[in-house]
Amino acid sequence: MKTAYELAMERLNKSAPEKKLSAAQKKELADLDARYAAKVAEREIALNAEIARAEDFKKAQGLREQLIAERRKLQAELEEKKDAVRAAR
């Protein structure tokens, strides 16, 4: 007997079949993941060091918000580039 999840996935695949990615596309997606993980880590290290040196709460809070915004921006860029790779055929 199939679960509700399996049935839903079957219906989804019938309406919008899953596209198979080539080995080159998979490699490019993995490279993008690695590159953006490094960018996020770089920004976290830099901003966390600034947060540690911050003398007042407001400045530290502003830096934390900046870090969150930069993470979101980088994640959006990554997803955009991944979508372009997936769409390329």
Image (tube, helix red, strand yellow):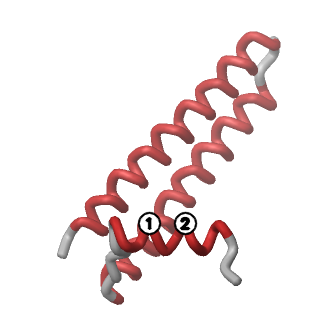
Q: Residues within 10 Å of mark 2 (few under 14, many from 20)?
A: few
- Judge by depth and name the residue closer to the eye, 17 or 72: 17
Helix or strand or loop: what does disc 2 sit on? helix
Coordinates of residue 67 in the picture (x, y in percent): 62, 33
Measuring 75% from the left and 10% from the top, which residue is drawn there?
Answer: 58
The amino acid marked with disc number 2 is: Ala
In the rendered structure, find residue 8 and report the number of the disc placed on it.
2
Coordinates of residue 14 in the picture (x, y in percent): 37, 73
Considering only vertical position in the picture, is 84 above or below 48? Answer: below
Q: Please, which residue is most extreme toward the left here? A: 89
Residue 63: which quarter of the image?
Answer: top right
> Which residue, given by chain and number where applicable, does mark 1 sit on?
12
In the rendered structure, find residue 89 and report the number of the disc placed on it.
none
Considering only vertical position in the picture, is 83 above or below 73? Answer: below
Measuring 42% from the left and 54% from the top, which residue is drawn there?
Answer: 78
Coordinates of residue 36 in the picture (x, y in percent): 49, 58
Q: How many marks?
A: 2
Residue 52: which quarter of the image?
Answer: top right
Measuring 81% from the left and 16% from the top, which residue is drawn there?
Answer: 55
Q: Quarter holding the N terminus?
A: bottom right
Coordinates of residue 25 in the picture (x, y in percent): 32, 79
- Judge by depth and name the residue closer to the eye, 21 or 28: 21
- Judge by depth and name the residue closer to the eye, 51 or 6: 6
**Disc 2 to disc 1: CB gap under 8 Å:** yes
